Amino acid sequence: MAHASARRDPARARERTLLALAAPALIVLAVLFVWPLIRLLSMSVEGGTLAQFEKAALDELYVAVLWDSLEIALIVTVICLVLAYPVAMWIVQAGRLGFILGMFFLLLPFWTSVLVRTYAWMVLLGRNGIINRMLRDWGWIEFPLPLLHNLLGVLIGIVHVMLPYMVIPIYAALLRIDPDLKRAAEGLGAPAWRTFLRVTLPLSLPGVFAGSALVFVITLGFFITPALLGGGRVVMIATLIEQQVREFLDWNFAAALATVLLVVTLAIYALLGRLTGGQGHAAR
Amino acid sequence: MDLTLRGVVRRFGAVTALAGVDLNVAEGELLTILGPSGSGKTTLLKIVAGFEFPDEGSVRLGATDVTMSPPRSRDVGMVFQNYALFPHLTVAQNVSFPLEMRHVPKAERQRRVAEALALVELAEYGERLPRQLSGGQQQRVALARAIVFNPRLLLLDEPFGALDRKLREVMQLEVRRLQRRLKLTTLFITHDQEEALILSDRIAVMNAGRIEQIGLPGDVYARPTTRFVADFVGESNLLEGTLLDAGAAEVPRFGRVALAADGAQPGTRATLLVRPEALRVGADAAGLANRATGRIVETVFLGLSVKLRMALEGGLELLARLPLRPSEPLPVAEGEEVPIGFSPEDVHVIAHGAR
């Protein structure tokens, strides 16, 4: 027993070393992120009342905006899913060149800021934007199409930003599927579409859930793109929070809205996490 | 149903994977394609299954030409190397899959799935997921799934590779019994010559995209037609020499070898095959037509036999395999000089250019 304390447990020692190495980052996060977050959240109940939440819950405007935000997030998720799945399938089966090409175009946007990309969409979609001018020059339309400062513009912009977040998890899930399973299904008599529905799709569901969770949650709190492309006509919850702070200097109400957003986000995460967890387990 | 391949050629760029394969698997027969990796046996399997298509030649199942048919219309049951069970479906759902694809009514489906699972002795396991089963059980599920729809042909792609030795032997015999009972036309792909000898009605030995020899296991083992087959199937002593007239051959560094078979042109170069178990060592060698003296370089104890590596005076090395009985000590020791011999009847002649 006397020796036990003198001898160091290597696993324990390794754990301590790793903790020490992680400490700087953890401290930075705690000081610059966790603490301000707690402060902000505590502002929402300042004075010991839930009045701010009452305001958020009872005022039709705020409820409507939250509802709209959820709706936009859902639409974006569905569009991304429909667009991303074929892309992911293509990259998986296109081999090395497809992988390089696909990843290049997927990751290319990450090298430019969201702000720049959003302005680029404004140039493309505006009344006198490139698309409208082209269509008019070709004589296809007489009056410019309303592409900007409406829901359509916002959706186009957000989908563009979110697409990689959907493609990559689905791609990863598809890549993990043993190609022999597809062959087995075909050999056992399944046409391509049944192989897809019975084998490929169910086995890729963990990726679908992961991608959907990412896209939905990020879209829900999205700020720049809806603010710029929506032109004030499409208001999402993040825009509303920013308004409260910048224009009305109502930090307490902004904090309450932020808390609501956070709670909704976490709830959705938990829900999808449960679905993903169950699926991932079954698909292994 | 019988399977017929005629002049099947498959090239991948500059590489010829199959250089003209003719093959016939009779109805109810288990034919093994035996070959090393890279011999083209996997490509052949894929062409029969429909995952690859030949550049030339034809594939027929019974009276139907299926050369260019997609896999789903071939009615071929296949057991994959890694079983390829659907991990998200239960055992029963896996076995039911080919029946569903054939629109078999639900009641009949359930009955046939139960039958197939009973056949592989997994009747109680229908509700399990594949990952809850052992390797041997997974393989049985794969087998049940491959036979439940009464396929025209059963394909086995090295299905025993992932099993440990004991289980492998059990499964080999089980597959053999099942195949005979159901009279399933079966094409079995393996690189394991021992497995091929145990299971097959006939063996086709493949090398470099061609079938080198096709025949009964005993024939392929005892009378290989090419040096490659002699070397690949079983253990062998291969002596290169020149045929003389009057039933003899001249082997450099060994001398004159008396042969039983005759008829080849004198002067023809030939490989002489002497199986290790045909070599006699010590007192047994006396009186045999072919004799020499060898030094035991190495002894390998194998339980029911002992393998000896011996160096002859001329520098040739020979393998011998002597049967053992548990009560007897090893008959020889390493380093010992012993007389060795073999009879002319035990020499198989592979004349070159006589293919």
Image: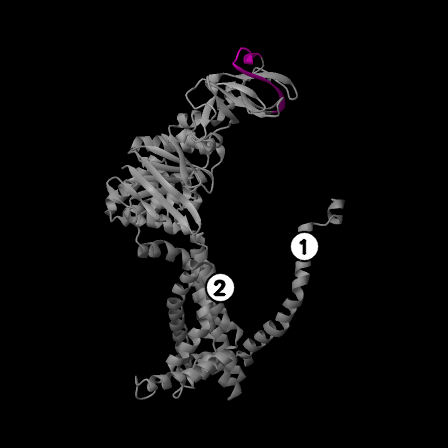
Res B181 label:
none
Count of marks, rendered view = 2
Q: Residue at x 45, y 37 (%)?
A: B191
Q: Is residue A94 above or below residue A83?
A: above
Q: Residue at x 46, y 35 (%)?
A: B192
**Residue A135 visible in the current orientation:** yes
Check disc 2 and give the amino acid type: Ile
Label 2 vs 1, first from the N-terminus: 1
Magenta-drawn segment: B283-298
Kindly identify which chain the residue marked by label 1 belongs to. A
Q: CA distance from mark 2 to mark 1?
A: 38 Å
Query: Where's residue B80, x and y in %?
Result: 40, 43
Q: Return the residue at label 1.
A: A14
Q: Are marks 2 and 1 on the same chain?
A: yes
User: Dot 1: what SS?
Assistant: helix
Check disc 1 and give the amino acid type: Arg
Q: Return the residue at label 2.
A: A100
Q: Is residue A274 magenta?
A: no
Q: Residue at x 52, y 19 (%)?
A: B257
Quarter of the image where the N terminus of chain A is located:
top right
Q: Quadrant of residue B255?
A: top right
Asked whether the beta carbons under mark 2 and mark 1 sit within 8 Å of each other, the answer is: no
Query: Where's residue B74, x and y in %?
Result: 29, 45
Crowding around mark 2 (Cα neighbors within 10 Å: few <14, some 14 to 19, many 20+) is: few
Decide if residue A48 is on the left or right side of residue B348.
right
Q: Is residue B296 above or below residue B202?
A: above
Crowding around mark 1 (Cα neighbors within 10 Å: few <14, some 14 to 19, many 20+) is: few
Kindly identify which chain the residue marked by label 2 belongs to. A
Query: Where's residue B304, x and y in %?
Result: 52, 21
